[in-house]
Amino acid sequence: RPKDIKPAPVMTLAVGAGNGSGRCSISIAEQSSYAPCILGRSFGCTNAAERSPSVWVRGCRGRFLLRGCSGKDETSGKDETSMIWCGYPPGASSYNCSCDGRSTASWPRAPHLRSRVDARAAARHAINQAPSPKALLFVHFAKCGGTAVRDYLLGHSKRAGFTFLDYAHAAEFLSLHRDALAWGGSNNKKGDRVLPRATQWNLSSFAVEFHHYAENHYWRGVLPRLGALRRRYVAAGGALVTFA
């Protein structure tokens, strides 16, 4: 989570007419997305005279302060402010979040993870849709259907233009980012090597499986520095996706 985010100023949007009952006010209390939350562009509020206000976000995620959800303050007579979480679960292009905690999301192309088939579709989407360089880090828990995802990635790697590293070679990916990760571990368990020694991570796309003994590579080598690794890929014009 970015540490230098400051609350945005309160915004009042006129979406109705007449006595002003169709107005709403919103401010951001905490930003959770790496993309900036810009007032009126990536987040705002909507209202109508007959409905409670709601929060809308596009490419933005966090906690928002919205007035008008809980009636009026008895002392001041002003609309009370409610805390609304919006932009979850991550991945959709836009969200609309109501006062009662419900939200609707727009998923134009990203698939939902509802089955093993959908998990394979999510892997395909992450590889094909993200800009280069790409990295898909797959934590393969035993007996949870991960073998089907691994087989899909392996079978489509050449056609999709990425390199698949199974768990026996996951250490090669970590070695490419040794300066950014908490990684001083050993090389491949098998001793062989898949990647050429001149491989540059910022010019390559990978799908990496962390399974069996290599799960420890992820928990100790990747997870403590996952935020820094994501920012590294974003700075290079790419993306890094993790899933289990």
Image (cartoon, helix red, strand yellow):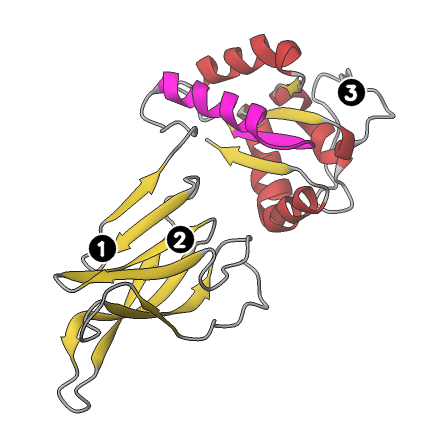
Indicate yes or no whether the magenta region holds residue 186. Answer: no
Of 191 and 98, which appears nearest the observer? Answer: 98
Cα–Cα gap, marks 1 and 3 = 47 Å
Q: Nearer the viewer, residue 201 or 131?
A: 131
Residue 3 appears at what percent x and percent y?
A: 58, 66
Give me the residue at 66% from left, 10% from top.
158
Let me know if residue 205 appears in the view.
Answer: yes
Crowdedness near tag 3: few (<14), some (14–19) or many (≥20) residues, C-alpha within 10 Å: few
Select label 1 or label 3 by which is in front: 1
Which stretch appears magenta? 116-138
Residue placed farthest to the front in the image? 18
Q: Residue 195 carries which label?
A: 3
In the rendered image, which quarter contains the N terminus? bottom right
**Residue at the extreme bottom:** 75
Task: Name the residue carrying label 1.
Answer: 101
* Residue 67, quarter of the rendered image: bottom left
Q: Magenta segment: does it hold 118?
A: yes
Q: What residue type is labelled 2?
A: Val
Task: Indicate the amino acid at tag 1.
Answer: Gly
Outermost residue, right side: 198
Q: Give the residue drawn at x 12%, y 61%.
A: 50
The residue drawn where x is 43% and y is 41% is 93
Mark in the foreground, 1 or 2 = 2
Residue closest to the eye, 130 or 153: 130
The residue wearing badge 2 is 57
- Indicate the secondary structure of the residue bearing disc 1: loop
Q: Is residue 119 or residue 223 the one in the foreground?
A: 119
